Image: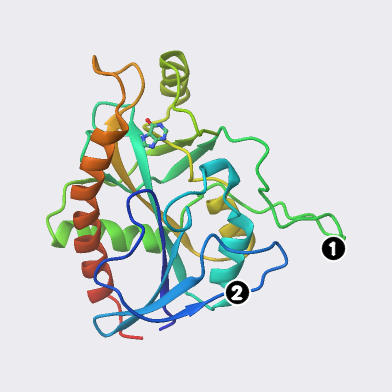
Amino acid sequence: MKPLAIIGGTGISELEGLEVVGEHSVETPFGATSRPVQEGRWGDTTLYFLQRHGSPGAIPPHLINYRANIWALHSLGVSGVYAINTVGGITPEMQTGRLVFPDQVIDYTWGREHTYDDGASGSLMHIDFTEPYDRALRMALIEAAQVARIAHEPVAVHGVTQGPRLETAAEIQRMARDGCDIVGMTGMPEAALARELGLPFACICMVVNPAAGLDDLPLSVDTMREILTREAAVVRQLLTEVIRARPAS
Ligand code: HPA
């Protein structure tokens, strides 16, 4: 089976447990990736890892070269991508410390390079995006979380904002009315670009705070980081189970 790729987000600059055996600086028509793609061994399995914020985590969400990142992973021949995102929780089930596997997305981003369709090919890329995340990859997450007894939310609407600032309380109220359960800044256009290339893609979201205006305390990046460190260990446990359940590559 072809290897999987993991895209790491804030707080996951390295994939602890990955024995790195090489790095790929992939040339893409869209420029450089956030960082060279690491190739490693996770137990018996080959895995690719890319930190979307670069290293040491400096590229803000609106300046990430999403096109280059997804293009590079596709050109390495991966079978699918799990993208790790930190998010704020909007609806009550989306508790801080919870892992969430969204099944839908609403895109509030703007001005990002969001498509491979440059208008030159003569055919329009009207991809079907009714189900933005790959069902089989999501099912594997849900099953792995059940086996490993990891608290998780198996469905959610992922609202993606432009950042880098956090939202206002009114924006979160609007997102709640729109039906968003969680809010993050990096979920799009990654998912759509992967679909344009036919690359199976799913998100692992870590809730690190109640979204703006939903808690008495102001949002604190330090508190988010503390939670992130704890949750990163749970994500590793989840990935270990996902990979254990796959045929070896
Ligand atoms: N909003 C947007 N992105 C985020 C948040 C949030 O509350 N928490 C972590 N990433």
Label 2: which residue?
Answer: 26
Q: Nearer the viewer, mark 1 or mark 2?
A: 2
Q: Residue at x 48, y 28 (%)?
A: 165
Quadrant where the C terminus sits is bottom left
Mark 2 Cβ inside 8 Å of ligand 1: no
Label 1: which residue?
Answer: 121
Residue 244, percent across and down?
23, 75
Q: Residue at x 66, y 54 (%)?
A: 127
Disc number for residue 100: none
Mark 1 → mark 2, Cα distance in angstroms? 23 Å
Q: Nearer the viewer, residue 208 or 32?
A: 32
N-term-proximal mark, 1 vs 2: 2
165 to the left or right of 25: left
Q: Quadrant of residue 179?
A: top left
Residue 172, percent across and down?
42, 21
Q: Nearer the viewer, residue 40 or 96?
A: 40
Q: Quadrant of residue 5?
A: bottom left
Q: Residue at x 41, y 15 (%)?
A: 169
- Mark 1 residue type: Ser
- Mark 2 residue type: Val
45 to the left or right of 157: left
Residue 245 in sight from this viewpoint: no
Residue 135, percent across and down?
41, 58
Residue 210 in sight from this viewpoint: yes
Q: Quadrant of ligand 1?
A: top left
Q: Nearer the viewer, residue 125 or 33?
A: 33
Q: Is residue 189 above or below residue 134?
A: above
Residue 202, percent across and down?
42, 56
Q: Residue at x 44, y 58 (%)?
A: 55
Secondary structure under badge 2? loop
